[in-house]
Image (tube, rainbow, N blue to C red):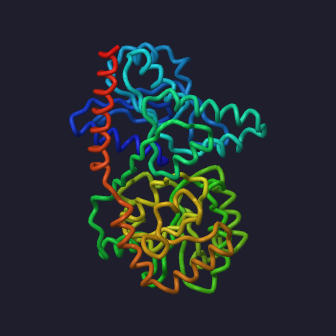
Amino acid sequence: MDGVSLTVKNYAEKLSRKGNEVTVVTPDEPGLQTDGKDYDIFSYMSLPVPRRHPYRWGLPQLDFPFQYRISRMPFDIVHAHCPFSSGQVALKQAQRQQIPIIATFHSKYREDFRRVIPNDYIVDRLVRQVVEFYEQCDEVWVPQASVGETLREYGYRGPMEVVDNGSEYAELVYSEKMKAEGRKLLYINKEEPLLLFVGQHIWEKNVGIIIEALARLTDIPWHMLFVGDGYARQDMIAKATQLGLTGNDDYRQDRITFMGCVHDRRMLAQIYAAADLFLFPSIYDNAPLVVREAAALHTPALVARGSNTAEVITDGTNGFLADADAEAYANRLRYLLSRPCLIDFSAGNAARTLVRSWTNIAEEVQDRYQHLIRRVQRKQVAL
């Protein structure tokens, strides 16, 4: 359940509830639930991606029953959220049926390639293939303008449209009672500031900076929650244990708790509401949903200065900025924890300025879909 998966899930739910027939096409995975939803799910053969659990590498070209089934689906429009297996399926459908295709650019693929491929020439070729995919689409969407700059750096020169992401917590009514109940659920001392990270436990998200910064702040009260999983989780626990922040014989001395994955979205909302400050020094991420989710529950974020995430943050107004190194991050965090009124001020502004509901986003998306369908149909009639 990363940001792209949540985006697709919310598109599918909200658009189907508006009376549209929606199909999600995705790599298969163990335990994938396809029943009881308002939309259809077509899955195809896949294998685990090495060192990137729980991601899957799709092989739709080898799944002949899937190919037969999908080729007979009468789509009006297809929307790709990645340029790889599912994106190629979408592109093939668009070309076969002469229907429009939209593709949203979400991720920093060059960094992903470099992590597993030590050859720059191969990485450059793969990035070029990503760009070629987007060049074949009728429209390219990005969740915020700075994300488009990443695609420009890859070599894409075509037009782009900014279409915001939403938050499924936007329609929740936050209250101090909700915060208190969340802290009670987590057994957090109400006088102790609660810090939070939600996301993949991978070094690319600068989670090491969080741990190293907190090790510099053991003289003041706070407790930290890490929610999620990833290849670096065990190494993160080992690092925190080495610094005396977790794994102590007396658990009451632990300053960090690693909760693992929280799949219950209602429980995750309680965790967001319970927190005082969301720590997110990642430069790797483009437009992370977690920052907006936290904002919806009145938890402002401390993000990395110069990151794409920082584009939507006004320092001291709806969130906070710090350089992406442990010392600077620790100094900024110490300053903020000594000024809870500043955190409270930013919390309300974050909720007002960073959060839109997926219902609202779906209305905009449906309008854009219909406009593009009509535009392509007019072009075909003219030809």
284, above or below 116, in the image: below
Indicate the quadrant containing the C terminus: top left, top right, bottom left or bottom right.
Answer: top left
**Residue 107: percent from left, percent from top:** 55, 45
Residue at the outermost front position: 382
Name the quadrant containing residue 379: top left
Residue at the outermost left position: 19
Taking 297 as reference, is 338 left or right?
A: right
Q: Residue at x 40, y 40 (%)?
A: 8
Q: Residue at x 53, y 69 (%)?
A: 302
| Residue 192 or residue 9, whichever sits in front | 9
Taking 48 as reference, is 119 left or right?
A: right
Taking 66 as reference, is 122 left or right?
A: right
Name the quadrant containing residue 340: bottom left
**Residue 241: percent from left, percent from top:** 69, 69
21, above or below 364, in the image: above
**Residue 25: percent from left, percent from top:** 43, 29
| Residue 131 or residue 195, whichever sits in front | 131
**Residue 262: percent from left, percent from top:** 46, 55
Q: Residue at x 48, y 68 (%)?
A: 301
205, above or below 19, in the image: below
| Residue 100 or residue 60, whichever sits in front | 100
Q: Residue at x 64, y 32 (%)?
A: 128
- How many numbered marks appear? 0
95, above or below 174, in the image: above
